[in-house]
Image (cartoon, helix red, strand yellow):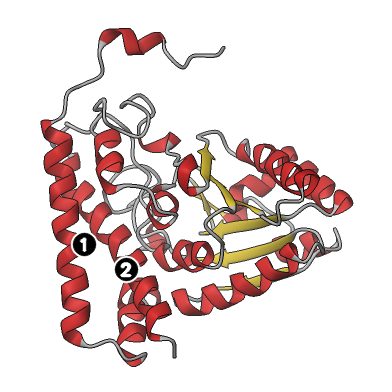
Amino acid sequence: MNTTLHTELYRKVYTVRMAEERIRADYMGDEMKTPVHLSLGEEGLVAGVVHALTATDKVFGTWRNHALYLTKGGSLDDFFCELYGRETGVACGKAGSMHLSSPAHGFLASSAVVGSILPVALGAAYAQKAQATGDIAAVFFGDGATEEGVFWETLNYAALAKLPLLFVCEDNGLAIHSHIQNRQSYDIATTVKTFNLPVFTSDSTDAGEIHELAATAAAAVRRGEGPAFLLLKYLRYLEHVGVNEDFSAGYRCKEDCADWFDRDPVRVQRANALKAGATEAEIAALENGIRAAIEAAVAKATASAFPALDELRKDVYA
C-alpha cells in the first residue's frame, strides 16, 4: 500500500470530519448566519474522487459542498469566515455555506438549486474540449437530481459530444426525506448505461477504494472517450439541513445502519494509513495539526469584521 496516498486521503477525510464537528459544536449559538448541509458520512466518497483529479481539473457541486471545498484545496480560514458571514470569507460573507467556491483550486461553483449545476459543468467540459487543455470537469450531485429534466439533457449532450465530463452521483437514497423507493421506478445505473457511457458503482466507505475507481473513470474521460458516470452510495449521518440527527427518516438511524457506522469512512481511512506504513505518532501529529488549524480558523472568523453595507450591491449581475 502507498503510505503517502493513504496518509493524504486520511488528511482530507479527517479535515472534513473535524471541521464539520466544529460546526456542530457552535451552530446552535446562532453566530453562523447560514443554513448548513453537512457531509458527515460521505467524506471517503468526496476525498477519494477529488484525489483522483488533477489540480487544474474543474469541479462543481451542490449545497452539500463542505467536503468538496476542503478536499479540493480551499482555505480553512476562508471557509469559517464565510460560514460566520465575515468580510474575509470566500465571498465576503455573502454566499454562506451553500455557495462555496475556490476558483484558484479548480472548484468553480456550487448551487443550491437541484440539478442546476449540471449544465454549468457541461459548459466547462465543452470549454476544456474546445481549448484542448487536457483537463476534465467533474460534477457532484445527489440521486434526487436524476429526477430533473436538466440531468438527462446534460447526460445526453455530454455523451453525444463526447465531452470530458465526470458525473459523480452522491447517492444517499434520500431527496430531503423521501426515500428513493418512493420516488424512482428506474435504476439509475442501468438507465444511464443506455446513453453509451461507462458506469462505475460502489457502496464502499473506503476512500482508497473510491480513489482507485474514480482514477479509472477519470482516465477514460481524459483519454477523450467521452463522459463517465460514478454512482457512489453513502449514508447521510444527519438531517438534510442542520446539525441534528435525522429523526424524520427513522429507517436510516444508527440502530438500523450499524454496518455503515462500523465502516465509518474516517475510521476506515485511519486504519488504511496505518496499514500502509504510517506510524501512530505520525497520524497523531497530523490530527493535532488539523484540529489546531480549525481552532485558529474559528478564532480568526469570530474576530473578523462583518461586510460593510456597500458590499450588499456588489457582485450582483441580475
Q: Report x, y in % for residue 89.
A: 30, 33
Marks 2 and 1, the one that precedes in the sequence: 2
Q: What element carries label 1?
A: helix
Q: Tell me residue 118's x, y (percent).
A: 66, 42
Mark linked to residue 11 = 2
Q: What residue type is labelled 2?
A: Arg
Q: Mark 1 points at which residue?
A: 290
What residue is at 28 percent from the left and 36 percent from the top?
Answer: 83
Can residue 256 be seen here? no
Mark 2 and mark 1 in contact? Answer it, CB < 8 Å.
yes
State the residue in front, 157 or 204.
157
- At 19% from the left edge and 69% from the top edge, which residue is drawn? 287
Q: Which residue is drawn at 24% across and 27% down?
A: 86
The Cα–Cα distance between marks 2 and 1, rounded to whole angstroms, is 8 Å
Q: Quadrant of the C terminus?
A: top right
Q: How many residues crowd around disc 1 within 10 Å: few (fewer than 14), some, or many (20 or more)?
A: many
Choose between 210 and 89: the one closer to the eye.
89
User: On residue 53, which mark appears?
Assistant: none
| Circle 2 Cα neighbour tier, 10 Å, few/some/many (<14 / 14–19 / ≥20) | many
Identify whether 98 is placed above or below 198: above
Q: Is residue 244 left or right of residue 73?
A: left
Callout 2 secondary element? helix
